[in-house]
Amino acid sequence: MEPIFFPDHPSFWYETLRTLGHIAYGGADFGEVAVTAQSITGGDYDSWHDQWLANADRVADRARIALESGHRTSARDGFLRASNYYRCAEFFLHGDTADPRIRHAYDASVDCFRRAAALFTPAIEPVAIPYEGTTLPGYLYRPGAPGARRPTVVMFNGFDGTAEEMHFFGAAAAVERGYTVLVFDGPGQPGPRHRQGLMFRPDWENVVTPVLDFATTLPEVDPERIAVFGASMGGYLAPRAAAFDRRIAAVVALDGVFDLGDISTAPLALPRDEAERRLRAAHDPGLDSEIEQAMAAAPTLKWAIEQGMFAMDADSPRAFCAAYLDYHLRDGIAERINCPVLVCSGEDDGFFKGQPEKLYHHLRCEKTFIAFTEEEGAEAHCQSGAQKLAFARVYDWLDEVMAQRPAVVGGIGRALSMTGTVVEAIDADAWSLPTPCPEWDTRTALNHIVGGMRIFAAELTGADPGGEHHDDWLGTDPQAAYAAAAEADHTAWLHAAATETDLAKATVRLGFGTIPGPTAALIHLTEVLVHGLDLAVTVDRTDLIDQHLCQELLARMRRMDMDAFRRPGMFGPEAAAPADAPAHIRLLAFLGRQGIPVVLAEKTTRS
């Protein structure tokens, strides 16, 4: 797309396009944006601030008058637009963190948004989410009457955006499709950065986990159907959280990000390892000078580094570039994700080009890639300027993923993913180690899992499994054998049991007879998960265990009559385990793994 405004200033044009895109959900009016843009001197941050502030003040004043006159809809619409315009006003000022204009415009933006929020039906409710001795600011959107449990989207912005802006960047679109929405600002994002001095952190799972703890207390949130949606740098933060918190049922990465170190080292004419070493060095005046020269030659880079220093409290451009190195999904992190992931990409993304493809390549879960193009007018970063088009595709995908898929089938997918992560971690010399399952070594246990997956997949699809359960299914590459069988197994369950009705109609023929689909699914979930736990315990990788899934299965089994299953070859009498032991230890104890739960509990306590 050719720039309509600021053809010689790409960052000014992108931010204008970003604001124009928010027209779709009430965040701007074309005329207001156009006359403001025409009055700005390109490349002049002060001019940008002054003109957007004047526009925001004008629109906010009219909204106040409308409210005083009883015109609630006009007031709501005006406050929404003013909130976005105030956000624009302070956008380029973060090179001087002491500039009072930053807080003035930010506070006005939040105030206007909250005034608008109160005028929606139902009202958008400001919330304070407990987090490490303080709170994170957020908003709860209800699509209908309070108390109705619905699929939920937890969403956040990225490197420079606000929770309030997420109204236009996905929240309103989700609500009109019937989702409960919880939006928040995390550390480093504007609310916590301005008010509590909290800076970005790469381990975003430690931000999202307390947010999900809060979300699952809300009656409007279906805890089995929580998606996490991250915009811009949030396309790294959301997958990062999903790699560690198994309650997440789906991820939207708008757009996908795999390694922000690629971004911070790109301006340097150095090999990656040397660039990292020099960025992290205590002193490197030569590199400091090189970065400053690059900033002087590229206004977008200058803004990005200054914004990064502001959001991460870095005391120099090099310190920010070094901090960015820690924001990555390498080292098997992306591979840990076990829920469906949507990776979006803009054909002409000016910030993270190539990153969505890298993320998609590393994912081992159910995944979808959507490439937005210039022909559609959606090629920009985060599809700015094409929100209606983008969110139609995003939420059509999410609607299908979050449909009433049986929970037990979702559990199978999570168990397959968890066990696959454990299998990938097994060293070549560990295949003969004894497992907690009597008389089985690591290879035998894995062969049992893979054979079971092949048989279940064949039964569900009507195919020939290609062997008996006790045959050798692993060949010379056990890990590849598991990956192929897991893919076939997961696909078969998704096809045969897409809904509760489908699952109820299904039957599976096993060695001891034909059993109904729901029972077969629970048996298979238990087999994959429990033997996956056996493997994790054997190779000392209990850090890879999905504790939430273990707790869910344990709770379900405690509600069942287990006596019929407590016999040789299946499960033994319940063993003792501490009540405060991790869920996988208590599950193994419940299923009769003698001795090992107590040993594990003691080891966990010592560690």
Image (cartoon, rainbow, N blue to C red):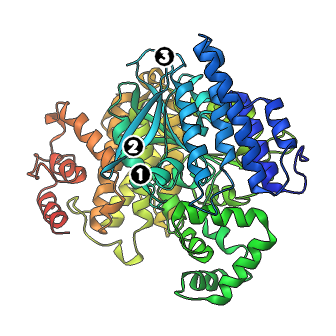
Disc 2 or 3, which lies upstream in sequence? 3
- In three-dimensional space, the C-alpha distance between marks 2 and 3, rounded to whole angstroms, equals 22 Å
Q: Camera-side residue: 424 or 158?
A: 158
Q: Is residue 568 visible?
A: yes
In the image: residue 103, left or right of residue 569: right
Q: Which residue is mark 2?
A: 211
SS state under label 1: helix
Q: Camera-side residue: 220 or 490?
A: 220
- In three-dimensional space, the C-alpha distance between marks 2 and 1, rounded to whole angstroms, equals 7 Å
Q: Residue at x 35, y 35 (%)?
A: 216
Residue 225 point in image, percent of width and height? 44, 33
Q: Which residue is mark 3?
A: 144
Circles 2 and 1, Cβ within 8 Å, touching? The answer is yes
Is 215 located above or below residue 580 in the figure? Answer: above
Circles 2 and 3, Cβ within 8 Å, touching? The answer is no
Q: Camera-side residue: 582 or 502?
A: 582
Disc 1 residue type?
A: Val
Q: Work out which quarter of the rendered image holds the C terminus and state it.
A: bottom left
- In three-dimensional space, the C-alpha distance between marks 3 and 1, rounded to whole angstroms, equals 28 Å
Q: Which residue is mark 1?
A: 207
Neighbour tally class for label 1: few under 14, some 14-19, many 20 plus, Cα within 10 Å? many
Disc 3 residue type?
A: Gly
